[in-house]
Amino acid sequence: MAGFSLSVPTIQTWLPGVHLLRTYDTKNLGSDVVAGLSVAAVAIPIGIAYAQLAGAPPEVGIYSAFLAPVAYALFGSSRQLIVNPDAAACAIVAATTAPLAAGDPAKFADLSILLTLFTGVVCIAAGIARFGFIANFLSRPILVGYLNGIAISIIVGQLAKIIGVDVAQGGVFRTLGNLARQITSLHWTTAIVGLSLLALLLLLKRFAPKVPGPLVAAVVSIVAVYFFALNASGVRTIGTIPAGLPAPHIPSIAAADLGPLALGAVTIMLVSFCSMMTTARGFAAKNGYRIDPNRDLMALGVCDLVSGLTRGFVVSGADSRTAVADSAGGKTQMTSIFTSIAIAVVLLFLTAPLAYLPSAALAAILISSSIGLFDLHSLRRYYHVSKPEFRHAMVAMLGVMTIGVLGGVVIAVGLAILRLLMLGSKPHDAVLGETEADGFVNIATEPSAKPISGVVIYRFDASLLFFNADYFASRVRQVISDAGSKPSVFVLHAESIPVLDITGASVLESLHVELAQAGIELRIAKSKGVFRIMLEQSGVADTIGRERLFASIRAAVDSHSSTQGGPT
């Protein structure tokens, strides 16, 4: 019996990063090391800040940034993408787990790990099923609106922490109202520290974008707290972070929590993958290569499994850390590996100074990051280019701000489905005329196109399905009514109708009878693929008459000419 062995090509199919390691060009070593250290310098304070956002202990943010980059380097297809904690995903983690934990820190930790593992399984299953197309499910305006809503929610949620007051959270507008009532009880020392750091971060982002602002803010605030004993003055710090690498933890689970966790996992998968692909595609286009969405969906799942097994929470493509890697000269996925090595060194030997990091500094980092997440430029562009898509973005944004991130996902998905139905139910169509140079073209957009006497040529630019079949029939009647004189032949240009279902076939059959009673012959030109198969299988081809199915518009028109324009 032959022994089982894995060939290198087989391993590289499942672990694409193996090819990187086998063929790594050492001339990239220096730039990849520098980029990895730069990413780690930014990832650690941001990870701690995102842990605060998710409601987790600060070390969990570092654990989440530790091994996930290595997993993506081995399984993913982007050379620049850094997988780390993400604002949107952390906000969903908090919204999913906090109500279930009911204030129990141990249960919260278990739920966070379970949610991360569930998300990993969902992503891997979706990748195996080749669901990478969901990266395009949320249109860019809807995704921008959703992320803008999260950005505003994070900013408002951190305002209390940056000025040192305790405010009950409950949606953007309610939180603002609670903050206004508590503003007179702010802690002045905390407010000075927090607002100064926020100003520093914004100035660095504006005038020195290559300087790692979160690292600078963290170091400055730690030094200030240590030398001026600000913690003794009431400035809150994150406290001691345990040294050492994370040990795996098997969480407990209650059956009642499975449903909410599964819903949260699907939600995170949808939002984080769509956002991650936006970042990955941008940097791939900039650096001249392509990515594989299905591979990256599975890679994201592996990253979440690795993060969950090492006591971290969900991760995604981190645009800010990816930008740091790219601007620092990172050339390959080795940047992610060097990032993880640097974070391991910090966990082993350098956690003690982090105990002096003030919570106000984390709030400043979160607010600064969220300001960068808010995309005002795109909103302005949508307003001028497409008012409907601008409205979709605004509805998604207001949904997150009013009913929360989970409810906002429902609104975003609902808007996406509604938009697809709207586009599909009333698609573009055209009446065609003939030109000497270009053949048959849209009369509405080409003034030189001339209609053919006695013939109407109509093009429907979508599949003919149950939800647009009635619209199609009404448009056919309207086009015939708008013709200068009653035609004797109606030619349906079917090349741009890829799919026909039973309802669409029935409507075609009814139109054939209706037009025949009016003395108009229905002809179909350039039917193919699923449309042609359904014509045959439904019997509509025989009802209309196979002699009225033509390979080209020219053949359909010439056949009309040969019969002097009369119906056959």
Image: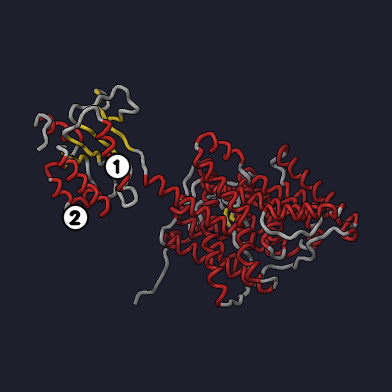
Badge nearest the viewer, 1 or 2: 1
Image position of 238 with respect to 531: above or below? below
The quarter holding residue 242 reads: bottom right
Q: Amino acid at mark 2?
A: Gln
In percent of width and height, residue 184 lies at 85, 52
Q: Which mark is residue 537?
A: 2
The colour scheme used to paint the residues is: secondary structure
Q: Which mark is residue 474?
A: 1
Query: Which quarter shows the N terminus?
Result: bottom left
- Report whether residue 357 is seen: no
What residue is at 51 percent from the left and 57 percent from the top?
270
Determine crowd level at label 1: few under 14, some 14-19, many 20+ residues with C-alpha closer than 10 A.
few
In percent of width and height, residue 280 lies at 53, 48
Distance from Cα at disc 1 to Cα at disc 2: 25 Å
In percent of width and height, residue 346 lies at 72, 60
Q: Secondary structure at mark 1?
A: helix
What residue is at 33 percent from the left and 47 percent from the top?
468
Q: Is residue 539 left or right of residue 264?
A: left
Q: Which of the marked residues, 1 or 2, is nearer the chain's N terminus?
A: 1
- Report whether residue 247 is seen: yes
Q: Which mark is residue 423?
A: none
Q: Amino acid at mark 1?
A: Ser
Image position of 380 with respect to 325: above or below? above
